């Protein structure tokens, strides 16, 4: 933080921000003092520290916004500010891992089945497919959600069902998981 404040203090690229830099520096000093006082304990001192931190964060965000506006994408200007740069280009995760076989069990009412699997890193959507165990490649229901929990309804009591789940991300769908199986009551 102090490198960023120092980097903008005498920087000719950001002379218009002198008042904002001074405000951030003063707020930073107030926060450091409040932080030291909060070490002694007490709800009041902790509340004051948290308030000074909130004030500082708001001022820094405003300063960084102004620095970005002045730099207008010029990396050299941004680097001269002394604040660390963030990577701006997002790279896709790539092919997704295959989800684990779902945990399958009775749903909340007769004729329902619930299935879930842990989330897959990079997935934005999940598809679940349901088939009778006696006809495993004939899917009777297919559902898509952003979450990993599914509820299948209107199923036949006494039948054994298989559920498979795949994950979908920026690079496309994953392979299908192994099936989870449950008998409907």
Image (cartoon, rainbow, N blue to C red):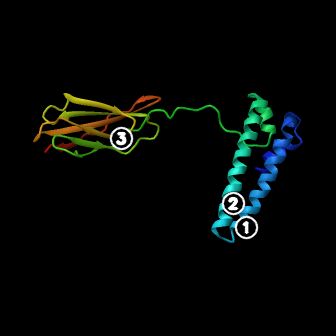
Q: Nearer the viewer, residue 61 or 149?
A: 61
Return the x and y of residue 23 as percentages of the image width and height.
81, 47
Marks 2 and 3, Cα distance to the nearest angstrom?
A: 40 Å
Residue 155, image quadrant: top left
Q: Position of residue 164 (x, y in %)?
A: 27, 36
Give the residue displayed 87% in from the left and 43% down from the top.
Answer: 9
Which label lies toward us, 3 or 1?
A: 1
**Which of labels 2 and 3 is toward the front?**
2
| Mark 2 vs 3, N-terminal side | 2
Q: From the viewer's perspective, is 162 left or right of 34? A: left
Left or right, residue 115 beside residue 110: right
Disc 2 from disc 1: Cα separation: 8 Å
Residue annotated with mark 3: 148
Q: Report x, y in % for residue 78.
A: 77, 35
Q: Residue at x 88, y 36 (%)?
A: 15
Q: Which residue is mark 1?
A: 37
Give me the residue at 84% from left, 47% from top.
22
Q: Hey, which quadrant is residue 169 in on the image?
A: top left
Residue 130 figure quarter: top left
Which quadrant does the C terminus fall into? top left
């Amino acid at each position: 933080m102090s490198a960023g404040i120092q980097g903008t203090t005498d920087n000719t690229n950001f002379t218009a921000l002198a008042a904002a830099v001074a405000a951030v520096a003063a707020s930073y000093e107030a926060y450091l003092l409040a932080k030291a006082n909060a070490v002694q304990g007490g709800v009041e001192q902790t509340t004051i520290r948290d308030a000074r931190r909130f004030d500082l964060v708001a001022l820094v965000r405003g300063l960084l916004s102004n620095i970005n506006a002045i730099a207008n994408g010029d990396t050299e200007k941004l680097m001269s500010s002394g604040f660390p740069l963030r990577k701006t280009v997002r790279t896709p995760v790539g092919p997704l891992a295959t989800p684990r076989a779902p945990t399958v069990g009775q749903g909340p009412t007769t004729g329902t089945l619930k299935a879930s699997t842990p989330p897959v890193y990079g997935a934005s959507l999940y598809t679940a497919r349901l088939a009778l165990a006696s006809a495993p490649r004939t899917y009777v229901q297919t559902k898509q959600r952003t979450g990993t929990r599914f509820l299948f309804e209107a199923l036949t009591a006494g039948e054994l069902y298989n559920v498979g789940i795949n994950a979908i991300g920026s690079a496309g769908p994953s392979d299908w998981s192994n099936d989870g199986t449950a008998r409907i009551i």
